[in-house]
Image (cartoon, coloured by chain):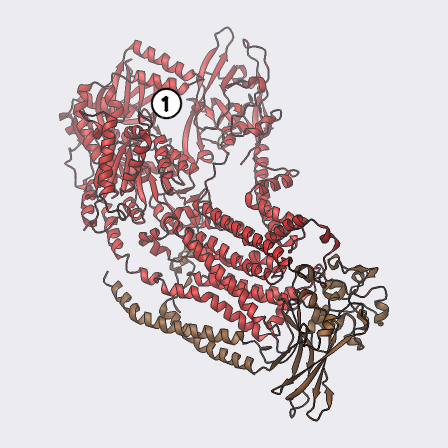
Chain colours: A red, B brown
Amino acid sequence: MVRKCACRGCPNHQKQPRRRKSCGGDEKRVDSRTIYVGHRPCPDTEAFIPSKFCDNRIVSSKYTVWNFLPKNLFEQFRRIANFYFLIIFLVQVIVDTPTSPVTSGLPLFFVITVTAIKQGYEDWLRHKADYEVNKYPVTVLEDGRSVKKESEKIKVGDVVEVVEDETFPCDLILLQSSREDGTCFVTTASLDGESNHKTHYTVPDTEKDLQSLYATIECEQPQPDLYKFVGRMHIYKPEQEPAVRSLGPENLLLKGATLKNTKKINGVAVYTGMETKMALNYQGKSQKRSAVEKSINAFLLVYLCILISKAVVCTTLKYIWQSKDGQDEPWYNQKTQKEKDTNMYLKMFTDFLSFMVLFNFIIPVSMYVTVEMQKFLGSFFITWDKDFFDPEIQEGALVNTSDLNEELGQVEYVFTDKTGTLTQNNMEFIECCIDGFQYKHRDELDGFTVTDGPVSKLQQRAGQEKEELFLRALCLCHTVQVKEDGAEETPRDQVDGIDGMFPQPEEERGFIASSPDEIALVKGAMRYGFTFLGLESKCMKIKNRQNDVEEYKLLHVLNFDPVRRRMSVIVQTRSGETLLFCKGADSSIFPRVKPEEVERIRLHVERNATEGYRTLCVAYKQLSAEEYAMADTGLREARLALQDREEKLMAMYNQVETGMSLIGATAVEDRLQEEAAETMEALQGAGMKIWVLTGDKMETAKSTCYACRLFQRGTELLELTVRTLDDERLKREEKLIELLRDYHRRAVQDAPPVKAGVTRSWSKANQEYGFIIDGATLSLLMNPPRDADATLYRSLFLQICQNCTAVLCCRMAPLQKAQIVKMVKNSKGSPITLSIGDGANDVSMILEAHVGIGIKGKEGRQAVRNSDYAIPKLKHLKKLLLAHGHLYYVRIAHLVQYFFYKNLCFILPQFLYQFFCGYSQQPLYDAAYLTMYNICFTSMPILAYSLLEQHISIEILLVNASLYREIAKNAMLRWRPFLYWTVLGLFQGLLFFFGVRFLFSNPALQDNGQVFGNWSYGTIVFTVLVFTVTLKLALDTRHWTWINHFVIWGSLAFYVFFSFFWGGIIWPFLKQQRLYFVFANMLSSVSAWLVIIILILLSLLPEILLVVLRKPRGPHSRQKKPGQSNVVGSQSSQSSARPLLMRTFSDESNSVK
Amino acid sequence: MASSYSAKEEDGHHSGSAGLGGAAIRTRKPDNTAFKQQRLPAWQPILTAGTVLPAFFVIGLIFIPIGIGLYVTSNNIKEIEIDYTGTDMSSPCFNCSQSFSWNSTTPCKCILSFSLDQPFESNVFMYYGLSNFYQNHRRYVKSRDDSQLNGDERSLKEPSKECEPYRVNVKPIAPCGAIANSMFNDTLDLFYLDPNGTKTQIPLIKKGIAWWTDKHVKFRNPPGSNLTAVFIDTAKPVNWHKPVYELDTDPDNNGFINEDFIVWMRTAALPTFRKLYRIIQKKNNQTPTLPRGNYTLEVTYNYPVRSFEGRKRMILSTISWMGGKNPFLGIAYITVGSICFFLGVVLLFIHHKYGNRNNSSDIPS
């Protein structure tokens, strides 16, 4: 969607809609803008120039009343198909063509009008929404008074007041909050769908009285990233150095977000109107095109060739025929003077164009409309499906694009994230290890643990001091907030629901955090007696075992990011000690602590990881005053930097987080999603190859794979990781190629060629392979030292992977995930890929894959927003692909083939008729029939079919996953089925024409001796045609709902009714009354009836025969197979209650019986 | 046809009560209706050898008799065709065809004799047939003005542009256009030669040869009691000898509603065609309409076809309920019927031999 910037005076914006839009005047086209708070000039700055910014008008509409028609038409005719039909229409208007311009003009007009109405309506809705937003009253503080204004009048620099539950009218820097601690809570549900409360902070140390605040804000030009903001505020006080405060996203309130739990805030507008982050984020995503569409285009090309060759053949034959004496212009059929004068070559050309026009119906306008409608309407069935409804989040599936429905039935590779997708991201603290001693806390229910008992026992293991330090670290090193009492119950609070297991309900507290790991850890600490009470004005309170409240001053938070894979806090105890606590992945902590401490803990960490737990290591360091001062200034400077803030911060973090000492490790269980194993098994059974792409470490990921039955006990694992590459003798690259060759030999060359890998056979005939690669090795593989090797490496790698049942890629950065998807996508045969993920780190791969699926998980809504389809749970993927995808594919494939077929047998008789009418472009059918054929007579049944057909019922599709393979690789739209349909069309077209031709060897067909003319001929052919193509569809329909009955029989009835009606009246607006009573007379002839019946029967006969001779497929024949998978299904559902590790091995032995 | 009827609505009934209970909290839960859940009750027909078999036999059994009936009917139709183009030297019409000129005022006549081996019992229909005459040529088909023919006075004065180049000849032409201009104007007369030598003309009826709706609705004379006065401001078509109001003496068959004219105006589908010319009504039950014997056909040869290598024929034919003589339908029905029957047999064989085995082999798995 191209959006228009509302600001005047900057016309160049429309040309670069995706670039930064700076409205700050041309001379200020720099990377930052300066805002004067409250429009008050500041003392030492240069002269106060009120710079021009956008006003706060939101213009999301595309059109105005005046430009709607030209602009909309222009946009519509930019589509190739519409343009083609426009050209045909113009040819008809200009050149003397056989059919009147109406025949192609009317459908085109219809299509254009419907689209225009739809777009106009949508635009009107946008206008209305814009108006509502723009006229919304807001309170602006001007010279100490509150002034009510319309929202659109807000200017950059205005101080705006917002009260609770109001949405922010523009992007504001929070200056003042009614809460004492200078915070406010917002929800950004309408922006990114995250309904949890987020805390935003006022700019530190601003004046209480905004009236006397003289400040400027310097910030970057607007950019669409919702989670990035860099700015700086200069506060001028009389007789003082101007103070500088850094501004980050935590100070910025976004337009569209809602103020919660806070009575009132004041903020200064920094971005307004179309420059707000919300507006910048409206840009539509890049369009994904489905494989079916590519097939359609290929078929179109074939039909275009047929069309042109038909026209060429006819034109050539016409001139050969005319060259014979007396044929061109017999005495009874003289040309007009104009025709005689026309140049011969021009005439040839216009003849060619006329033939094109005559046969142009072979490429139907209506197919595009029907395909669009089918996709649009069809996608509703996904949103409507109650099986996708998740009672926990009260939401069902979401369809962001309907263009890809059928692609769901074509998936060959599934790329899945692990955390939150395969696993629940519902963390539970399992155990910890302090100073090398193991602490376990397990529910009795499991009966599994060698429990180390109650807390009191702990003392015997590690020193009390160490233990408490560790627990304090857990309590302090996080960004968790305690949920306020009386805070709104959001569905997100379900995160906290898991602590129902804990015996002390009074201690149940609500925590809000961006990552569920942190909540689990805080709760784990709580179980051992350390309770985090909350953060109040930079002061963290902890209740320790003695029920004393300890207070720590929070000095710095070194935020978590996926690259560093750790986070730290710097706190000050009451006694003045400055401590740094750091927690993070083992790989990022171990190099930063003393090596002698590592060994004791590494063992535990690795053991935990193999059991499928998520492990984190905790380290700390005491900072001396000097060290802290250095770190403090460094961090502050980095935070204030306007350029490269991220990089500078990162460098600073790395500098601070060194030389720590390791105190322990934690293990958190991330439970498998419901039915994760069954889903994966079904997808594999459907012939899909599943790749797990995760940032997690190999051991954890591997055990998850075992638990999901992606790997089984018999699976031979081919590992290509940093560990296997470690070799004394060889360099890493050499070892890499050696391993690749070795694996390639094992998995590709030795394996039996056809069935290898693709089928998960129930017998153990084939050795199954699983492949494991990690991020470091992958980057070596993708970017080898010598460029020449790259292609070799890749092709080896791909070949190995293609022969593996499952591939696990661990330690992946988000970008690497996308890289892998891209590599597979572009590999030989360009397989259809699907990515599924729930977090921001999956966005890149979701966008990269053919189909991106977002899970409405706990890690925010970015994945959902960028996905094509969003589902609440992983288990829904099974139905989405196996049932919906399968059906959509079959439906649309049939729709496309049927459309080409029905137009081929529609136009073929018209082509053949040219041989009998002196190649004069005489149409066989009346103009009304030509026009209505695709619009009315044959469009509804196929539309109903393509929406409702279930050639195999949904239940069977779900139970019997291997049915999915029958349509793999675009099976219904390959050249063979296309050829079949084309031959069918040719056969029927020939039959229609010549059947009636032989009947007309004696045109006296009525019992009163009267004869039929050419229009009767056409009408008989047309009647046979309409009935045959409709009945052909009826034969193909396996699922007759009342709607199918209604449209199929209704269309035929309508055809009969229309023909009577059309021929029953002398229409004053028609030049020729060609069809007057032709249809009625036809019906009065027994011969016509007989020929119609036999031709319909004869044309359907081969179809019936084929259906009969083909293997019977239907509910009956399918009922026997599913038994096997049923057994497994029931087993696994019972097994999912058991602990993860046991499940892995016991079930495995069951399923490979 | 075997079919299974799956009514999957069992959980559709809960929606009502659930809706009542959950009405207080607005939930985004999708409606549990049969349509939205794609669970509409559906009839699922399956075509198998077993179900199609009887259909094949039934079709075969119905079609073969129909075909035989049609074939016999068609064969019983008596039809005689006489080519009188006159391209051969030996043909009586040779002279007429050679010496044709548009300007000649004296009509050229030729007489052909033929004999009927069998009597034509019922009503006999007399057709004229033309070959290689492209009445379905686009330029020709559109060269008419239907509103003029419908009696519209404005179109009478201002004929449609489609009629070019037969639109205006000083005065507007009525009826305009190439179709009307090239109207067939040979006169065919039929005489019966009694064995005793007398020559009796057979009465030819010229009414009832055009579609009723054409004659009574589609073709109308312009209003006015006197046709001559009505057409006073118009010119006759260039190739006509007489103006349109002199086509017949009977006012009910004159002007635009002349049936010969109407028949001609219904353009034929193929370049070889026949058009109904006259009807010979059966007189009584005792004597056949056309008894066995010798006949002569007197042709007033006005219509040139030599320039485009056309042929002209006169056809006498009786008519059955299925129309004129055409063995095609009969043969088609017999063929299709036999094919269906044959396929039925083959399918029966296949069904018996493989069908049962397939069924049994599925069970143990």
Q: Position of residue A1013 (x, y in %)?
A: 64, 68
Q: Position of residue A335 (x, y in %)?
A: 72, 57
Pick out the residue farthest to the top. Answer: A239
Considering only vertical position in the picture, is A336 above or below A877? Answer: below
The answer to which image quadrant residue A1083 occupies is bottom right
Identify the chain of the residue marked 1, using the numbered disc in the image.
A
Q: Position of residue A1138 (x, y in %)?
A: 21, 44
Q: The disc labelled 1 sits on which kind of residue?
A: Glu
Considering only vertical position in the picture, is A10 above or below A1120? Answer: above
**Res. A486 visible in picture:** no
Left or right: A533 as drawn, with respect to B67: left
Number of numbered discs visible in the structure rendering: 1
Left or right: B182 as drawn, with respect to A74: right
Left or right: B45 as drawn, with respect to A732: right
**Res. A59 visible in picture:** yes
Front-most of residues A673 and A434: A673
Front-most of residues A228 and A302: A302
Front-most of residues A50 and A747: A747
The answer to which image quadrant residue A2 occupies is top right
Determine which residue is flagged by label 1.
A536
Front-most of residues A607 and A1062: A1062
Q: Secondary structure at mark 1?
A: strand
**Quick one: label 1, few (<14), some, or many (20+) residues within 10 Å?**
few
Considering only vertical position in the picture, is B204 above or below A1091? Answer: below
Pick out the residue farthest to the front. Answer: B89
The answer to which image quadrant residue A64 occupies is top right
Q: Position of residue A557 (x, y in %)?
A: 34, 21
